[in-house]
Image (tube, rainbow, N blue to C red):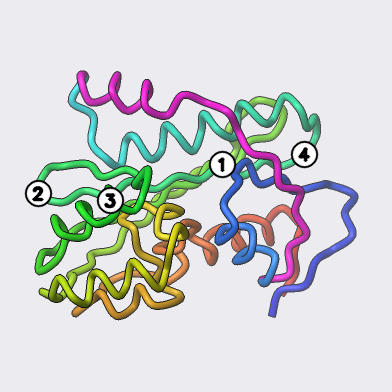
Amino acid sequence: MHDLLDTGMSVVLASASLSRATVIRNAGVNIVQDAADIDEDAVKESMRRLDHTAADVAHQLAEDKALAVSVRHPGSLVIGADQMLQCGGVWFDKPVDRDHARGHLQALRGREHELFAAVCIVRDGECVWRHLESARMTMRPFSDDFLDSYLASVGDDVCRSVGAYQLEGLGAQLFARIEGDFFTILGLPLLAVLGFLSNEGIVKR
């Protein structure tokens, strides 16, 4: 059980993600949520041209987000996080609408893909800790009828996550096999983050 210590140091999540905020708050960590505004597409395209891996990109985006927000929160620990999904050498982003979500799920069904989740914690413009975890996930070969039903049930929330699935809900029905940490799939390697915050005196066991 982790409890928050009254250290006077604030913890900032540099993300607008509801799932990340919920995960860390439910673990007993009080956070300020302040989303970073960076050009993720430009970062991805630049790194793609330089033959960086999907894991490299996740690391870079997590750091860029934390650094961008750190200037607004001097003295605070700022958590930046990002995910990258790779299947058959192709990178998948969050779908922009339900039609794109359908295309992503059609491309992923019946196949294994890898999901990378990176986190970088910054204080006063300096990265003090970084971490990367991955999960291997195999979607079952579901029917088009199931896909239609899933998209209708989830609605626009399907666009909130890379891969167009939400494992904490109906998205679990998409999968035949999962190898990896549940929190990593939700977008934040929570146990590793809690370990760091414990070492910093932010939480106690």
Q: Which of marks 4 and 3 is nearer the N terminus?
A: 4
Note whether 180 is above or below 97 in the view shown. Answer: below
Whichever of callouts 4 and 2 sits on the residue coming sooner in the sequence is 4
Residues at marks 4 and 2 touching, judged by CB atoms closer than 8 Å: no
Q: Distance between the residues labelled 4 and 3?
A: 40 Å
Report whether 109 appears left or right of 30.
Answer: left
x, y (%) of residue 178?
Answer: 26, 74
Q: What residue type is labelled 4?
A: Ser
**What residue would you read off at disc 1?**
80
Q: Name the kind of residue labelled 3 in the image.
A: Asp
Among the two numbered marks 2 and 3 on one chain, the one whose residue lies closer to the N terminus: 2
Amino acid found under the numbered disc labelled 2: Gly
Q: How crowded is mark 3: few (under 14 residues within 10 Å), some or many (20 or more)?
A: few
Q: Are marks 1 and 4 in contact (CB under 8 Å)?
A: no
Give the magenta part as a residue range.
27-49
Disc 1 residue type? Gly
Q: Is residue 166 above or below residue 187?
A: below
Answer with the quarter of the image where residue 23 lies.
Answer: bottom right
Name the residue at 67% across, 56% down. 197
Q: Name the residue under label 4.
A: 76
Quadrant of the snapshot with the C terminus: bottom right
Please identify, in this view, whether the residue under mark 3 or under mark 1 is nearer the observer.
3
Secondary structure of the residue carrying tag 4 is loop
Q: Nearer the viewer, mark 4 or mark 3?
A: 3
Q: Name the residue under label 3.
A: 99
Report the side of 129 relative to 41 (left or right).
right
| Image x and y of residue 94, in percent | 36, 46
Asked if residue 178 is among those painted magenta in the image, a careful observer would answer no
